[in-house]
Each structure stands twice: as C-alpha cells, then as structure tokens.
Image (cartoon, rainbow, N blue to C red):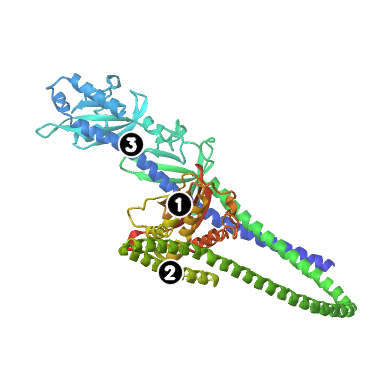
Amino acid sequence: MKTTFRQRFFAVAGFLLIIGGLSGVVWVYAERSALNGLAQRGQSDLALAADRLTSELQRFRELAVLTADHPFVAPVLLGEQPAEDLAAVLQKVADKSGSLNVVAVDRFGKQLAAARADGAAEVADSRYFRRAMDGALGVDHFLSTSFDRRAYAFAAPVFADEGPVIGAVIVLADVEEIEASWRGGRPTVFFTDEEGFVFVSNRSELVLLARDGAETAFVPYSEQQRWGHRLWSLDAGRYLPSVALHISLDLPVIGLTGEALIDVEPARQLAALQAAVVAAVFLAFGALLFLATERRRALKEVNARLEARVAQRTQALERLNRDLRHEVTERTFAEAQLKKAQDDLVQAGKLSALGQMSAGISHELNQPLMAIGSFVENAETFLQRGNTDAAARNLTRIGDLSRRMARIIRNLRAFARQESEALSEVHLQNVIQAVLEMVEARARTAGVTIAWEPPAEPIYVRAGEIRLQQVVLNLVGNAIDAMIGQPEPRMEIGVSISEGRVQVSVRDSGPGIAEPEKIFDPFYTTKEVSDSEGMGLGLSISYGLVQSFGGDIRGRNHPDGGAVFTVELDLIERSVAA
C-alpha cells in the first residue's frame, strides 16, 4: 500500500512540474506575440497621429504661402500703400483660418501689419525669419510670450517684382487648438523637439516636459529591453500606463519626433490567460487520466469478482436462453400475422381509391357531355334555319370536345396509375376561353353573367393543358351551380401576376361556403343528394392537379358576398415561352 501511494505521489508531482514548465513556455510565447502585435498597432496609431498633426500644420503652411501672394502685401512692404488695409485683410484671414496671429514684416523684421497688434514680437533673430529672407519657407515652433501659448510659425517670403525678398508673412498656428480635438485619446502620444521638450501631446500633463530638464523634468520612468522592444515603467498617475511599450517615429517635415506609450497590461493579461487555459486543460486531462487509471484498477478488481460468479450463473443463463428461444418463436408468429393484416389494409386502400376514381370519371365527363348536347341542339337549330356554316362550327366543336373527353379519360387513368404527363408551357387565356365556350350554353340557361376580360399580353404558366382545363372547368361549373336560384347571378374571372406567380380567381354571387376548411375533402359537397353532379370529387381532384403543377388552390368567402376560388401557378416569362 505504501509503495502504491509513493508512486502516485511522485507521478502527480512530476506531472505538475511538467504543466508548470509548459505553462511558462506558453506565457513567454504569448507575451512575445502580444508585444509584437502591440508594436505593429502602436506604429500604425503613431503614424496616424503624426499624419493628423502634419496635415493640420500643413493647412497653416499653405495659408502663409497664399497670404504672401496677396496683392496688398508687397505694396505695404514697399511703402506704397498704408498698412491699415493690409491689417484688415490679415484680420479676416486669421478669423477664418483659426490662426493665432498673421503678421507682415519687412526684410529687417519690423512688423508693419498684423491681425492682432497686441501680439507683436521681434522676429529678426528667429530661424524661421532668416530662412524666409533666404527665399525659402521658414518653419519653427516655440512658446509665444505675447500670447502665452505654444505656437508653430510659418514664414513665407514676399518677393518684389524685380526679384529680391522684401519681407515675409508669418502665420502662427495655435498648437493647443490642434490638440483639442484629440486630447485624451488612446494611446498616449507626444511629440518632442530636438532638445527633448514635449511640444505636442494628447496628454496635457506631458506638455513642455523635458527628458533632461531640471525644472520641467519628464515623468519618472525606467526602460528595459524585452523581445526587441523598449518597455517603460512609469509612475505618472492613472492617465498614463504603469508599464508601456515605447515607440518613436522621426518627423523631419515638422522638426519633431513622434513617440507613443502603449499599455502592455492587456497583453500581459492575455498571455497569463492563455497560460492559465493551457494549465487548466492539462490539469483536466491529468485528472481524467488519473480517474481513468483508478477506474481501470477498480474494474480489474470487479472483473475478478465477476469471473467468480460466471460459473454460478451459467445454468441460470441456459434456462433463460431456452425461454428466449420460445419467446422468439412466438414473436415470429405474431409478426407474420401483423404482415397479413397490413397487406389486407393496403388492398382495402386500393379498392377505396379505385372507387373514388370511378366516381371522378363520371363527374369529369358529365360537363363535356352537357356541352356536346348543347352544341348538338344548336347545330340542329342552325340546320333547320339553313345556316350550315354555324352548324359545321358546332360539329367541329363537338369533335374537339370528344377528343378532349378522350384526353380527360387518359389523364384520369394516368392519375389512377399514379402517372402524369410532363408539364409544359400553357397559354392561360386559351385555357380559360375554351372552358367558357364549353359552359356558354349552360350559363345562358342559368341566366349567369360572366365577366371576363382577358389580358392583352399572352400569359404562359407551367401546367398540363387538359388538366388545367379540368381545374378551371370545375371551378366555373361549381360557380354556376352555386348561383342557381340567386337573383342577378354573376361570375367574375380575373388574372393577376405577382412576384413570378399567376393568380386566377373565380368569384360567384352565390350563398358562399358553409365550411371553407372542408371544401377540398373527397365526397364533401353542398349540392342536393339527389343531384347527379353532387359527388364532391371535383374540388378534391382539382386540388391534386394544382398540387402536381407545383401551384396552390384556395377557397374562401368574399367579404361582399359569394365565394371566390384562387389558383396560383408559376409564371413563364414571355421570352422563354416564345
């Protein structure tokens, strides 16, 4: 027992040491990767801040150059025009540009006109003025004693017509106004000059501090190198990071060096979190491995005890096996009986379906037979009147109806065999017109007014032509039957197109539908029992046909009275149909 406990102790201790070492490696790698990522993002942020500062100063640089070319400047510097007019111009320029001051000086540095006269200063000994006198654009930054503000100066030379420099226009940019829009942003960014003074920063506590200054010393910090990066440890309050990644960027265009302090605490937290996750995963794996080992040992002991019981239970299992074989025999017999019952049910279902199809044939052929009878009567009347042309047209229609009946029988027989003709492009107006011709005499006898205005453009839908005629014929025939005995019976047929679908609606002025939810059930009808047409299969068959087209059929009561049935089919564009 003691040996086993000692082995477990050393195994667990070794495993924990391995996890500690692996977590340390992960932490180091994660911190290095995080610092590299911070350095890349910090360089991008610093470059963006530098571009922002440069672009702000560029605006005043261009202002100085443009103002130097103003037509009032040179005459004033030559003494040919009073300085009051130029001072007014410079005042407008300063107000519109937000400049701290705009000054015009002669070649000796004497101020002749200024936007703010109280901000006069001697510029003769300044670097930017001397450079302007050399014919180039002078640039410098300083703390303006006149305005007690940090200023960036741009001096643009003014040339006489003969060529020599006669003076300069100096534009002072207010650095604090430039800082105002990005003060407090992240990361901490500051710009130092060649003497180490912080001249521009998004942290006000760093402004005008110097790295090597005595009275204005920079905030206390210490620097260390880590993975090729400079890390600063600062003690400067809550607005500056305690440990930061230091990044610098030279900006010779404006004579400053951009520097950024990126807080590395999130990176260290991320590295610690990754190391903790790795440690947790391996600890969980070790715990599972330890539990599996203990379980295996326990199972081995249990297995030994179970093997001792196997011999005792063999006889009981043999008796149980005999009982199971007897039960299997009984279940086999029961399954045979169940299969026979299922076959009987399938046969009964086939006989029921055959009965419905037989009733459907008589229902679907009744309406064409009535139309043939109407055409025969009309033909006899035309022959008695000697109108052989009209009688011949009726006979032609009778032949068409006979062939249509043959196609209807073929379609119904195919439906009974679960077969269907291939869908094709069907001219919808022709289908509706053919149906109206078939029921014309019947509608006239019933006194029904049919409102049908075919669309001007041909509409093609995806369906079977004969089967679609059956659907429309059922709807129109049902509408006529529903309006028998109604005052002023009227049927409206409409066609509309929406979102690639065609809707065909048939509305009647009858009494409506008593039970709309049952109208598509087989053998459901609202007609009299003695009526030979009231078998209740028309709408059921129509529902199946429309579903086979990939469409939909709905029936409801219209708010203004009567019933309306809508058939929705897929539209085939005219160009495809052509």
Which residue occupies 40% across, 62% down? Answer: 375
Label whose residue precedes the other's in the sequence (1 or 3): 3
Q: Is residue 207 above or below residue 477?
A: above
Circle 3: residue type: Glu
Between 335 and 166, which is closer to the camera in this rendering?
335
List x then y, in percent, for residue 577.
35, 63
User: Distance from label 1 to label 3 (Cα)?
Assistant: 70 Å
Residue 116 relative to residue 554: left or right:
left
Which residue occupies 51% across, 48% down? Answer: 485
Circle 1: residue type: Ser
Residue 57 visible from this viewpoint: yes
Q: Which residue is mark 3?
A: 56
Which residue occupies 51% across, 72% down? Answer: 414
Q: Which residue is mark 1?
A: 505
Label whose residue precedes the other's in the sequence (2 or 3): 3
Task: Say which of marks 1 and 3 sits in front.
Answer: 1
Q: Are marks 2 and 1 in contact (CB under 8 Å)?
A: no
Badge 2 density bin: few <14, some 14–19, many ≥20, Cα 10 Å = some
Q: Is residue 298 above or below residue 336?
A: above
Q: Which mark is residue 402?
A: 2
List x then y, in percent, for residue 575.
32, 61
Image quadrant holding the C terminus, namely bottom left
User: Distance from label 2 to label 3 (Cα)?
Assistant: 92 Å
